Structure formats: structure tokens, C-alpha cells
Image (cartoon, rainbow, N blue to C red):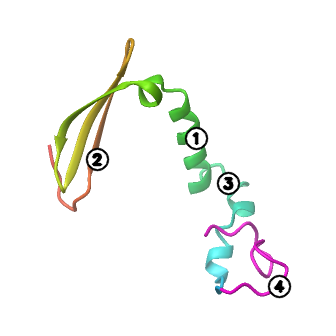
Amino acid sequence: PLPWNQENHAGFSKVKTWLPISDEHKAKSVSVQNQQQDSVLNAYRQFIAWRKQQNALLVGDLQFLADHDDYLVFIRKENNQTLLAAFNFSNKPYS
């Protein structure tokens, strides 16, 4: 879980939590990342906001181009918007 803050129990509880929370995780808490424009949390927020504006991803038709254990490629289309998505699940490059 993502800690909420850097306090004793990371914002999850006022008493000791059943899972330990390391200081390393507290240093990457929501309260810390909120203040950093280039944080992973804010990058996800920006991506999710962008995704919500893409009609092709929200309601578009789906066409699979390649489906394999190591990779997945598909197109989403809605009206005049076409998005190509390619995902490599392996540790080797594909072209």
C-alpha cells in the first residue's frame, strides 16, 4: 500500500499497524509526492487525466494486431481518433 504520510503509522492508523511500514516507504508517501511535480504519483495522475480525455480508449472499437505471451499490440478507434498500443512483456526488444 502507498503510505499517506510520514507519521508513525503512515496515515493508516493511530495505533500500530499489523504490517510494518519502513521509513523508506514513508519517504515516498502521498504527502511527499504531492509536493514533487516529477514524482511517480503525479506522473500517474497526469497519465490518468490524459487517458480520460481519449474517446478511443474509453469507447472505441478494439482491434488486436498481435497477441503473444511476450507482447500485445492493438488499435483503439473512435470517430477520427486512432490509438496504437504496443506492450512488450519480455526483456528483449521487438520491432
Residue hosting label 2: 87
Could you tell me how far apart the alpha carbons at marks 2 and 1 are, in whole angstroms? 20 Å
The answer to the question of whether label 2 and label 1 lie on touching residues, with beta carbons closer than 8 A, is no
The answer to the question of whether label 4 and label 1 lie on touching residues, with beta carbons closer than 8 A, is no
Q: Earlier in the sequence, mark 3 or mark 2?
A: 3
Q: Earlier in the sequence, mark 3 or mark 1?
A: 3
Could you tell me how far apart the alpha carbons at marks 3 and 4 are, in whole angstroms? 28 Å
Q: Which mark is residue 36?
A: 3
Q: Earlier in the sequence, mark 4 or mark 1?
A: 4
- Circle 4: element type: loop
Magenta highlight on residue 8: yes
Tell me the residue at 26%/35% (across/down): 74
Q: Amino acid at mark 3?
A: Gln
Residue hosting label 4: 15
Could you tell me how far apart the alpha carbons at marks 3 and 2 are, in whole angstroms? 28 Å
Q: Quadrant of residue 20?
A: bottom right
Could you tell me how far apart the alpha carbons at marks 3 and 1 are, in whole angstroms? 13 Å
Horizontal side, residue 80 vs residue 89: left or right = right
Q: Amino acid at mark 1?
A: Gln
Residue hosting label 1: 46
Q: Amino acid at mark 2?
A: Phe
Tell me the residue at 23%/45% (across/down): 72
Residue 40 visible in the displayed image: yes
Which label sits in the foreground, 3 or 4? 4
